[in-house]
Amino acid sequence: MIRIRFEIKGVPDVEAAFDDLWLKTLEATGLAMGVILHQVARQERVMLSLGWHPFGTRTGSIPPSPPWRISGALSRSVTVEGPRMYNFVWRGQVGPTSPYGRIHELGGWTGAGYRTYLPPRPHLAPAWAIVRPTVHSTFAKVWEHTTRPNRRL
């Protein structure tokens, strides 16, 4: 009978390396989310700047096109919150803080006695539709850079 004896050394070092890799990847996930959220915000501002008209005049945008800019307040109100991690889940938000941002996006009844219907003029959904195809590659690049630091982004 042949007996082979072997000894494994360095297991704690390997475990520490995996823990380090996990932490770096977790941090990189937040960075990638931040990049994506800011891309959506930038695209939304573009959607809100496709046209312009003076206050009190009819808009040239036809639903479901995004609303045309009057003062630029809606575009300037587009903000990014986060990303922040809660229980190892990254969360973030992007969109306008202006009170009329939601009704422009989704449409609805407004005005005195809610007698005026404002049709939907989405600007956030189309911005997300433009950015969404790049999400996978953004995460892949960031994670590759994290796991293989000698490679360029």
Image: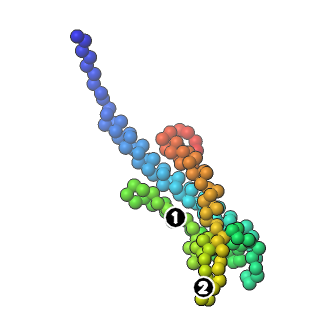
What residue is rendered at 56% in x and 56% in y? 35
In the picture, which quadrant includes the N terminus? top left
Ranked by sequence position, the earlier of labels 1 and 2 is 1
The answer to whether residue 65 is above or below residue 131 is below
The residues bearing labels 1 and 2 have C-alpha atoms spaced at a distance of 29 Å
Type of colouring? rainbow
Query: How many marks do you count on the picture?
Result: 2
Left/right of residue 32 with respect to residue 56 in the rendered view: left
The residue pinned by badge 2 equals 114
> What x and y, as percent, mark residue 94?
55, 65
Q: Amino acid at mark 2?
A: Tyr
The amino acid marked with disc number 1 is Gln
Residue that lies at the very extreme toward the left in this rendered image: 1
Q: Which mark is residue 93?
A: 1
Measuring 76% from the left and 82% from the top, which residue is drawn there? Answer: 57
Element under label 1?
strand
**What is the x, y in percent for residue 78?**
59, 69
Residue 112 x/y as whole percent: 62, 89
Q: Residue at (25%, 19%) from the top-left corner?
A: 5
Image quadrant in which you'd find residue 44: bottom right
Instruction: Determine crowd level at label 1: few under 14, some 14-19, many 20+ residues with C-alpha closer than 10 A.
Output: some
The structure residue drawn at horizontal position 71% and vertical position 77%, both measured from the top left corner, is: 70
